[in-house]
Image: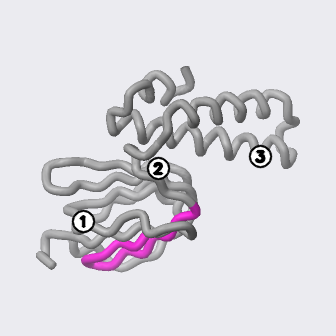
Amino acid sequence: MATDAIELQIVTPERHVLQENVQSVEVPGKEGYLGVLPGHAPLITELGIGILSYRKDSETRYLAVINGYAEVLPHRVIVLAEAAERAEEIDVERTRRARERAQSELSKAAPGFEEWQRADLSLQRAQVRLQAAAKAGAAGAGEYAHGA
């Protein structure tokens, strides 16, 4: 592998989502985003809910990532996520409906209780999926990405 590349692997319990050599990676850590270039110091970090982006050649690609862990080595990043979905695979209409259901459930639930926490998590997941789809240029995603 060239020294100016990083092997990026993304795995969920259901499938091996991605394995590519890339120039850079940005992962959604629990406490903020982490940028990784070739030669990065080794570390393990917990992931939050967010958009993982990576550069391959002159193109930036996006995935919605839901919780998990990332292991960073000088020339490899391994992401073990609860869920990960390439932006181009996201069904925008289905995700929009999921966001609307979560917003409705959130408005009915008492803050702090289990129902509210579950609805809040569903809302976060739907919003990050719509944002990833919008970044990738999915038709109809942009109008929904920020809570339209």
Residue at the location (57% across, 70% down)? Answer: 13
Q: Residue at x 25, y 48 (%)?
A: 60
User: Residue 37 falls in which quadrant of the image?
Assistant: bottom left
> Where is residue 102 shown, x and y percent of the image?
71, 35
Query: Measured from the top left, where is residue 108 in percent x and y?
Result: 85, 29
Residue 46 visible, this orientation: no
Residue 105 seen by the camera: yes
Which kind of residue does numbered mark 2 sit on?
Ala
Q: Residue at x 44, y 29 (%)?
A: 141
| Residue 100 x/y as whole percent | 67, 28
Q: Which residues are magenta?
A: 70-82
The dot on residue 37 is 1
User: In this view of the protein, which residue sits in the foreground, 19 or 42?
Assistant: 19
**Residues at discs 2 and 3 in contact (Cβ within 8 Å):** no
- Is-magenta flag for residue 75? yes
Position above or below: 127 against 73: above
Mostly what secondary structure, the magenta segment?
A: strand
Q: Secondary structure at mark 1?
A: loop
- Left or right of 46 in this view: 72: left
Q: Earlier in the sequence, mark 1 or mark 2?
A: 1
Could you say which is closer to the camera, residue 111 or residue 52? 52
Mark 3 = which residue? Answer: 117
Circle 2 Cα neighbour tier, 10 Å, few/some/many (<14 / 14–19 / ≥20): many
Please, what is the three-letter code of the amino acid marked with disc 1?
Leu
